[in-house]
Image: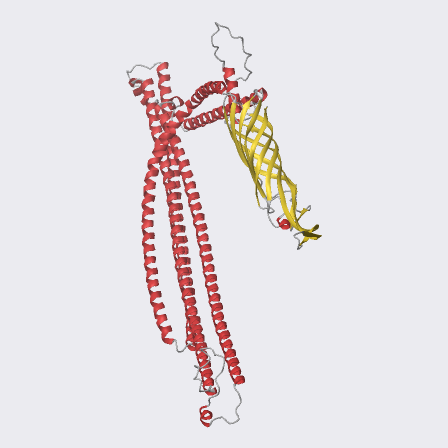
Amino acid sequence: MTLADSLPPPPRKAKAEETFRQSSQEERARTAVILKHTILGTPPPPEEELERQRREKNQQVNERLARHQAMIKDRLERRQERLDALTEDGAADPSQLTSKAARKREASLLKAERDRAKALAKLEADMLKSEQKRLKAVAKREAERAKRKAENEKLVAKREAKRLKDERQQEQVLAAREARRSEEEQRQQQALATRVAKTPERATPKPQLVAKGVTDPPKAKAPRDTAPPKPKAAHKENPAKTARLAARQEARQTRELRKSEQLAARQAAERLAAEAENARRMAQREEEQRASEAARRLAEEEQERQQQAAAEARIARQEYERTQEQERQRREALRVAGLATQRAEEARNPPAIVTQAAVPPSVAPAPGAPRLSAAERASIARSNRARLKQQFVEQQRARKLAAQRQKQEQKAARLALQQARWERRAAQRKAAKDAAADRLAQRTKRQDELRQRREADQAERALRKAEDKAEKNRRAMGRDQRRDDRRTERKQRRAEQLAALEARKAASWAERAARKLARDQRRAERLKYRLERRAERLAKKELRRAERLARKELRRAARMARRAARRLRRQQNPPYWTAEPGVALSLAARSGGSQGEKSLEAITVQALAGHHRPNGLSLRAGLAATVINSKVSSVETSTTTVSRTAVVRIIQNPDGSRTEEMGTVQVPQTTIRETRYYNQLSSIDFPVLLGYRLKGNRLGLLLEAGPSLNLSSGGNAHLKVGDTFRAVGGGHFLGRRPGIGFVGMLTGEYQLSEKNALIGGLRIQHFGGSFVNPEVSGNATQVTTIGLQIGYRLRF
């Protein structure tokens, strides 16, 4: 359907008696185009572009119609070729081929060709599907192998890390014990030296004390574990007893060291046995996995071979059935053609003439019989020639049928021979693959047995070495070994149970897959008949599709035009842009900064520009310059002494008079001085605001919020250092603050005209980042302002 594009006519002056004029087809088409591009948010294309699009659409329709006509023409040509081939073979007359039987034969031939094409396509799809399945299974096996390898490597690394950790802990324990033992020995030696040094020398000790070997007791109290109990005051310390205690302590430390060495040897033997057991388990697990993978791979290959052989047998059977069907149809056509020829001959020649024509022309008439005329003799000659010609045609046709039958038999024999060859080759391939799988299994088994023997030898050597190092712990190790053997037997039994369970599952899955394959074959046979009927229905539907599409497009264009008209009438609020200058007076809340600093007012001048959508959403951005004032002050009180002239002494005379003496007096004086400085922080930011607008007649409310990026920052300030103030340097303030701030505004709008409005409301801004350099000032100053703003909004 072609739609003409044109601009709507100019509006006419409304009259009181004029009725509503219905829009034309061109106006509705143009309205639909404008509405479509309005929804997309793009300007409508010019008339040249619309004309080009219509030409391209018409060209595509014409090309599709041309392809359809070429396909119909090709089908007709192929049908005519088949008719010509049947006519050349002598099957029937062209006039007879238009009958119902001929059309049925042609339909059966086309159906056989379609079935063969479908079977080939299905075979290719099955082969492709099986190849994809095989590739997927190979990829899955590779992924599982890589996963198992990674898990084994991770397990080995974890075991090695644990072993190193245990060794480090054992070394730390031994080092700690050695350090404690050395410290204990040093402390004992120091205590002994101290006691010897403090013992006074005696010229002639008492005989009973000398016999006992008692000396003066030490003044300092020795530790409980290194010195003997404090003797009574009347007795003295015995050096022999002290030596015996030291020897006993050393023997005890030696026994502890020997016990630690035996414990370390026992732990090493247990670790070696555990590693051997883990290696044996890993080898057994890998052997089971390889065996399961080999069995699964052989099952998949056997299934693929069976599917391929079944597909080839199915194709051969379909080819043989198609050949038999063609032969039967050809024989039926020959029989029908012969019957039709015989009926036509009988219709042309009456019975008497036929009887005469059956007589050979060489036989003379009987005496006394009437003499035949020349016309009768010519008729008899023509009938004889036609009969001879018909006999010749029948002989030629029989010879052709015999030759075709012989060719078909030879072709069937070749197909049977090829099928037998395929089966023989498949059996040979299967036997070769089975032998290869058996050899692989035997080699794998031998390798696993050799590995197991090697690992068993290593484990035995490790156990013998552990027994040599820890003779006293043999019973404990035997008990642990028996416990590990029982645990291993339990795990092996569990593994055998799991393997049997997996085998039963595999058999169940195989049986289920066989049932599913049979069910799929039956379903495929049912679907084949359904698809044939569906193809006929679709062929009929395709003929009516173009008309339905045309009617549908016409109705859709009319519906879109009506909808566009309604939307254009309802649309009253198109999108627009705004520019807004404004000023805000706020109060500042500070965090950080110098002590004693008081926040004052903050003045913000901003200019925003943005886009407003009809649904109320808006996106605006601009610049905002802010100056934040603060005050820092201090009060200093100083007390000084000032010399003054005053009465320093009053003398009371006897006569009752009084004499005053003047002099210099030191008078204290207090001075109060207040120092005040005004600091400023300046910032230029780039806010990006997303908002929503509620609009009335002349009043509106706009809520906006969004991030703010700092473009420039600075300040001018004095800081209090001790009792004085100093001006900060250039590196005190940051030239550009890092971080992202926040701006939020709630503004009301009063519309002065269609494009001008006054605004006022609440404004909150958080300045992201610090104004001062923390490395210079030692702290971070952040500011948040909240205040009122007024402005002027211009719409365009």
Q: Quadrant of the C terminus?
A: top right
- The residue sitting at the top extreme is 17
Residue 200 seen in this snapshot: yes
Q: Nearer the viewer, residue 264 or 653?
A: 653
Which percent across, then down, holds residue 781?
Answer: 59, 45
What residue sits 32% from the left and 14% below the top?
A: 371
Q: Nearer the viewer, residue 448 or 79?
A: 448
Q: Nearer the viewer, residue 537 or 675?
A: 675
Residue 364 seen in this snapshot: no
Q: How is the image coloured?
A: secondary structure
Q: Is residue 365 left or right of residue 208?
A: left
Which percent across, then down, holds residue 334?
Answer: 35, 28
Q: Nearer the viewer, residue 213 or 174?
A: 213
What residue sits 35% from the left and 22% below the top?
A: 361
Q: Is residue 340 above or below residue 495?
A: above
Which percent across, then down, holds residue 104?
Answer: 36, 27
Which percent across, then down, holds residue 208?
Answer: 44, 93
Quarter of the figure with residue 631 = top right
- The residue sitting at the front extreme is 655
Q: Is residue 641 above or below residue 70?
A: below
Q: Is residue 556 left or right of residue 49?
A: left
Number of numbered callouts drawn: 0
What residue sits 38% from the left and 38% below the top?
A: 319
